[in-house]
Each structure stands twice: as structure tokens, then as C-alpha cells.
Amino acid sequence: STSTRSSTFHKLSFNFTSHHSSLHTFFTLFPRLWNSLPPVKISLSKETIKLHVKKTFWNHFIVHFDPNNVCSYHYVCPCFSCANLPVNSMYS
């Protein structure tokens, strides 16, 4: 069973840009999101993987949500001030 975070699977990278609009694009957000997800065994069923991902997002929301901080509404915040910060994940 291969893991999505084994030594043969490298983390995704992206080129940071200072343009505010590009922070909201798929090509900027997806690598940050992917790199912050926990390791998952590829041999698991699709439903089991989906359950793990949902639990990850929900647990992150419960732990990090702050009604006074709009950035806490996102797993990977797309705003300009958060773009260079590491994702608050217990797995990264």
C-alpha cells in the first residue's frame, strides 16, 4: 500500500506572485492545500479517503475557527497576508 506522502511522492510547489488576483486561482491554492493534507494510503477505498479528508477539514475548522478572523473560514486562506504563511495543519 502506497502512501500519498511517501518519499516517491514529492510535495507540490508553486511560484508565489505578488498579484492579489492570482492568489485565488486553482494553480496557487491547490498545491498549498495538497501539501497540507495528511498522508493517505492509496489502497483505501474512495469512500474511506473521502471520509478522512472530510474529518481533516472539519477538525481543522473546529480547532482554528475564530468568528472575528475571516481568514479562519478557510483551510488554506487565499488572502494576500496569509499567502506566505504555512498552513495550520497538524500534518504539515
Image (cartoon, rainbow, N blue to C red):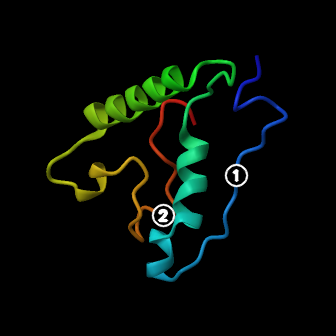
Of the numbered discs 1 and 2, the one sitting upstream in the chain is: 1
Query: Where is residue 21 drawn, in percent x and y?
Result: 44, 80
In the image as oriented, which residue stretches furthest toward the left? 67
Q: Residue 68 or 24: which is nearer the viewer?
A: 24
In this rendering, the answer to whether 16 lies above or below 35 is below
Q: Which residue is mark 2?
A: 83
Q: Quadrant of the N terminus?
A: top right
- Quadrant assignment, res 78: bottom left
Q: Residue 85 or 50: which is nearer the viewer?
A: 50
Mark drawn on residue 52:
none
Q: Amino acid at mark 1?
A: Leu
Relative horizontal placement of residue 29, taking residue 15 as reference (left or right): left
Task: Identify the residue at image location x=77%, y=43%.
Answer: 10
Q: Which residue is mark 1?
A: 12
Q: Amino acid at mark 2?
A: Ala
- How busy is the neighbourhood of tag 2: few (under 14 within 10 Å), some, or many (20 plus)? many
- Quadrant assignment, res 44: top right
Closer to us: mark 1 or mark 2? 1
Query: Where is residue 58 drawn, in percent x and y?
Result: 32, 32
- Quadrant assignment, res 63: top left
Task: Identify the residue at image location x=58%, y=20%.
Answer: 45
Task: Identify the residue at image location x=52%, y=50%.
Answer: 86
Total number of numbered labels?
2
Query: Where is residue 39 drawn, in percent x and y?
Result: 62, 27
State the SS at label 2.
Answer: loop
In this rendering, the answer to whether 88 lies above or below 15 is above
Query: Where is residue 11 drawn, in percent x and y?
Result: 71, 46
